[in-house]
Image (spheres, grey):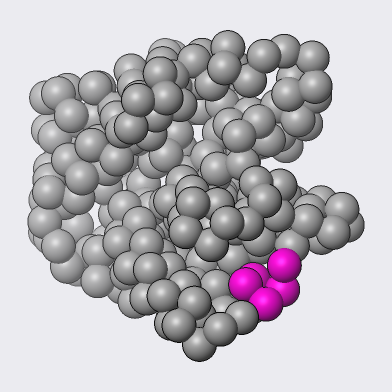
Amino acid sequence: MEIISLALLLILSFAIYFFLSMVGLGGGMLVVPMLILVFEIPPSIAIGTSLFAMSISTFAATMGYWSRKSVNWKLALAYNVFDIPGIILGALLTKIAPTTVLELICGCGIIVLAIVVLTKKSIQKRSASIANQEAEDDNFYEPDFSFAWTGKNLIVVIFSSFMGGLITGMVGIGGGTVDTTSMISIGIPMNYAAGSSSLAMFMTNIFGAVTHISLGNIWWDYAIPLGIVALIAAFLGSRLAPKLNSTMLRKMLGIIALITGLRLAFNIL
């Protein structure tokens, strides 16, 4: 790789991993298009290379959020249970169904979640209540998220877990957009949603990266520098995120999710 290309890769990827790690995303939704459009890498190789780097970025982000006690492992596991079946089904569907139809379905689902995150008042109230509890109790480390396992919320968790895996297997971008936005939609505070989603994505991305390594879908001269940048940028972004305004981060995530949904559903952005 030429020096100029390497410098461009490092600068663009640092900005992507740093920014998206602050809202609990792994970076695939921007890294894959960057590799294809800017560096003219074949899509299958771009997806595999991105998944390798995302496994590192989500690990680094998880460590950053964990150090600030913003990871709920029960949430992460819940959102990971149906990821693997979703990935397998997504890969199979690409062989038997038109990609445009599948992207339309997944995109519309993300759009709905984005609108909920951007407009639902009760999300702000529940998140504020948990934040106040943290401020008042010096021994408070992790709130009670039992409301996520009851009634309609449990359906959202199961559906989102499966959809996250389906999108990963079908179009090669991480399911963090679905995981994080759905967590927020049921009232999980932004910092816990981002931290728990990072852990869930790390487990999913490892599975995806190993699969693509076995298929030879990784260019290591791109994957290694991407991995190094992802490690540094995602850790720094996750450490900075809890210090920023949670409402601003929530709106940023909602906008990113909306753009992603529109891009998938209608291929217009």
* Count of numbered marks: 0
Residue closer to the observer: 155 or 46: 46
Q: Residue at x 42, y 39 (%)?
A: 177
Task: Residue at the far bottom: name it.
Answer: 3
Per the picture, the main secondary structure of the magenta-coloured stretch is helix
Q: Residue at x 61, y 81 (%)?
A: 1
**Relative vertical location of residue 172 with respect to residue 118 in this rendering, above or below:** below
Q: Quadrant of residue 137?
A: bottom left
Q: Residue at x 50, y 87 (%)?
A: 3
- In percent of width and height, residue 213 lies at 81, 60
Quadrant location, the C terminus: top left
- For the magenta stretch, what is the residue range? 219-223
Residue closer to the observer: 57 or 39: 39
- In percent of width and height, residue 149 lies at 48, 27
Residue closer to the observer: 228 or 115: 228
Task: Residue at the far right: name it.
Answer: 214
Seen in the image, is 208 located left or right of residue 145? right
Q: Is residue 256 visible?
A: yes
**Relative vertical location of residue 159 with respect to residue 47 in this rendering, above or below:** above
Does the magenta segment cover residue 47?
Answer: no
Q: Quadrant of residue 195?
A: bottom left
**Relative vertical location of residue 14 with respect to residue 115 in this rendering, above or below:** below
- In percent of width and height, residue 210 lies at 79, 58
